[in-house]
Image (tube, rainbow, N blue to C red):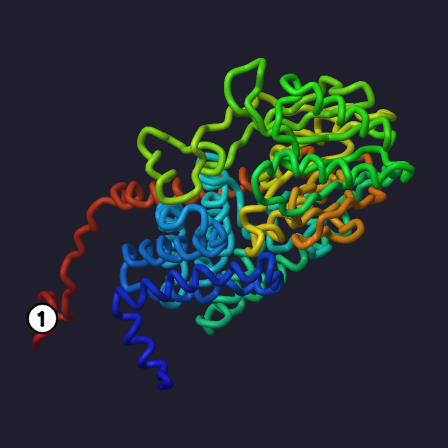
Amino acid sequence: MKLSAADWRRRLDSPWWRGVAAALAGALPMLSFPAPSLWWFAYVALVPWILLVRSAPTARRAAYDGWLGGLGFMLAVHHWLLPSLHVFTVVIAALLGALWAPWGWLTRRFLAGVPSAGQVVAALFVLPSAWLMVELVRSWEGLGGPWGLLGSSQWDVEPALRLASVGGVWLLSFLLVAVNVAVAVLVAVRQSRVPAVAGLVATAAATSAAWVWSPRPDVDGRVRIAVVQPGVIDGVGGAEKRFAREETLTRQLAGQDVDLVVWGESSVGFDLSDRPDIADRLAALSREVDADILVNVDARRSDRRGIYKSSVLVGPEGPTGDRYDKMRLVPFGEYVPARSLLGWATSVGKAAGEDRIRGTEQVVMNVGDGLRIGPMVCFESAFPDMSRHLARGGAELLLAQSATSSFQQSWAPEQHASLAALRAAETGRPMVHATLTGISAVYGPNGERVGSWLGTDAGASAVYDVPLAHGVTPYARFGEWPVYAALLILAALGAREGARPFRVRRAGPSPHVPPARTAHESPARPER
């Protein structure tokens, strides 16, 4: 049955139907991310959500619509967690969705009814700023980290990557929300189309200026990096079988003149100090291929208490002493926040039975002929500040060792692989994303793809000629300046709103106006 516009309006009067519509509208931006990768859709994906929120009958309802849309968004971008965390995924999405309630309230505040030109212009700055605050808060690792930032949808768009070098993924998110606000006004408010068009023109002008004037990394050499991806290894003795497969694939690299071999996350399931036989086999491999090997050890350490995930560099003589212990752990996957309170999550899903121990500092390692590398582990590649810190610390090549074997049949591997393109573009440093089971990928200093991806169906080794670059991007130099600008915008809004009742009080009561007089000097009597 086809519903008319009036029928839809009547349905949206129902809180239940309106809530469903808000959750669905919030989920739409997911189509902009891999695997669908409809990057262009990100420029209009928020429009249905904005139109729904601006039509809310009350400010409280607008906040509800923001919350429910946030729930839909978080559930959509993390849907691949459902097989692991089950109902807990929905609980997390509902909690984090509440971060969008203030955004919903502000959307109605500036765009309800027929907004003035001033309100539209303000909305083009305030709503993207509020969105950035949501992304900033949920980027804290304890809340799941910065997975699914709206700007990340532009990972394969060259002009967007150039903008990322100026203001990081934060600038991309800000501009995307601003464009969505302008499009929503163009669609819904005929009287306010002029400022909306002006906003789109200004965004296009700023993008063009960044394209022309932003500095480009200066390519000044190349290195040959080999990635070893063993593929899915199941059954009893998985750690031993995986290591043997990685040995076989690494031996195939002999004679290919590689500078570094990179294995994925948890590629070695034994502490090398406790298993000198494993360390000796790795050293023999290093001699055979004439290159250092960066492995990732996921094991209980013999010299310290607890389980660590560590990037360990092994050379011809054995471990070189360069080691990086993963600092930012995956909530529930590698530790359970407030385990005494939330430990029940282990009984309804695949949450960590024992917490991993986090490292304390990032490390830049020296490899072979003076190459300096900055390792990260798993979802640490989603954090822009970590790659920026490594680049500022002298890393010429960024590396992420990952394992997405639990999510092979989902969109997670492609989403994860795409993040390295943004980290490369932000810092002006090439980045290698090496995994156990795919997708492995390599990107140049502008965020461009180098070679082909190793997909989730591949068990192979591959060699990439990776360009090196020097120079400092504006983002690497100035950091998260779009976030600071957003904070200033919201602070200015708060100061203005806070001053409004003060101005009303200062105005005082209206002055007494004497009654009007007629020509005969008697008070006017309107009834006469």
SS type, badge 1:
loop
- Characterize the local packing of mark 1: few (<14), some (14-19) or many (20 or more) Cα atoms within 10 angstroms: few
In the image, what residue occupies the spot 31% across and 43% down?
A: 503
Residue 97 relative to residue 279: left or right: left
Residue situated in front as seen by the camera: 21 or 510: 21
Q: Residue at coordinates 27% horizontally, 70% vertically from top-left?
A: 13
**Depth check: 136 or 456 in front?**
456
Q: Is residue 220 visible?
A: no
Quarter residue 203 falls in: bottom right
- The answer to whether any part of residue 73 appears in the image is yes
Instruction: Indicate the position of residue 151 as horizontal and vertical percent values.
Output: 59, 51
Q: Give amino acid for label 1.
A: Arg
Image position, residue 416 (x, y; %): 61, 47
> In which quadrant will I find the N terminus?
bottom left
Question: Of all residues shown, which one is farthest toward the bottom?
Answer: 1
Q: Is residue 354 above or below residue 143?
A: above
Q: Look at mark 1 in the image and give the residue it sits on.
A: 525
Residue 215, by quadrant, is top right
Q: Does residue 103 sit above or below 113 in this rendering? A: above
Q: Identify which residue, 49 or 516, lies in the foreground.
A: 49
Residue at the far top: name it: 303
- 434 sits to left or right of 258: left
